[in-house]
Amino acid sequence: MTMLRSISMLMLFVTLVISISMVSSSASSPEAEFVQKTISSHKIVIFSKSYCPYCRKAKSVFRELDQVPYVVELDEREDGGSIQSALGEIVGRRTVPQVFINGKHIGGSDDTVDAYESGELAKLLGVSGNKNAEL
């Protein structure tokens, strides 16, 4: 019984080590490093696709607040698909847009518009908001 328990514990430990190394290796991919570096280097970051109406809507929120985000147009990069996959692993969604402010993940288009309309986005950015603007 003790031998069986020891083997079970060893198998559990090995599984845990393998899982941690898989997460670490995916989190340290060049694309994941690019995402993290981009987020930490800019006040506002939007991972977008140039043709996406939801991305355009999210970008328009920042125009309303007279803010200029750093935009990564994934469809205009050779590594865009890989970056999008890395984003999916980091934030749990592969959809675009994905918006970050001061290193904090805000979410997608609906999340960004909701934060704008509630005044939370202006507060995060330290600017006065215009809730009456038509998006």
Image (cartoon, helix red, strand yellow):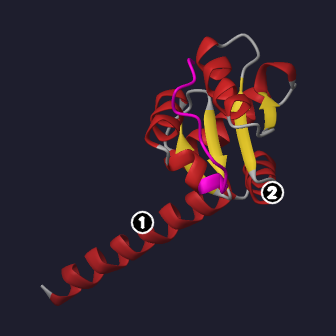
Q: Which residue has dot 2 on it?
A: 37
Are the two marked residues, 1 and 2, in contact with CB atoms closer than 8 angstroms? no
- 23, 55: nearer the viewer: 55
Residue 56 in the figure: left or right of residue 90 = right
First of labels 1, 2 by sequence position: 1
Report whether residue 127 is seen: yes
Which span is picked out in magenta? 124-135
Report whether residue 29 is seen: no
| Separation of marks 1 and 2 at Cα, in angstroms | 30 Å
Q: Position of residue 36 (x, y in %)?
A: 73, 55
Q: Position of residue 16 (x, y in %)?
A: 43, 69
Q: Which residue has dot 1 on it?
A: 15
- 123, 45: nearer the viewer: 123
Amino acid type shown at disc 1: Thr
Q: Residue at x 83, y 57 (%)?
A: 41
Q: Answer above or below: position of 27 versus 44.
A: below
Q: Residue at x 43, y 41 (%)?
A: 118
- Is 45 magenta? The answer is no
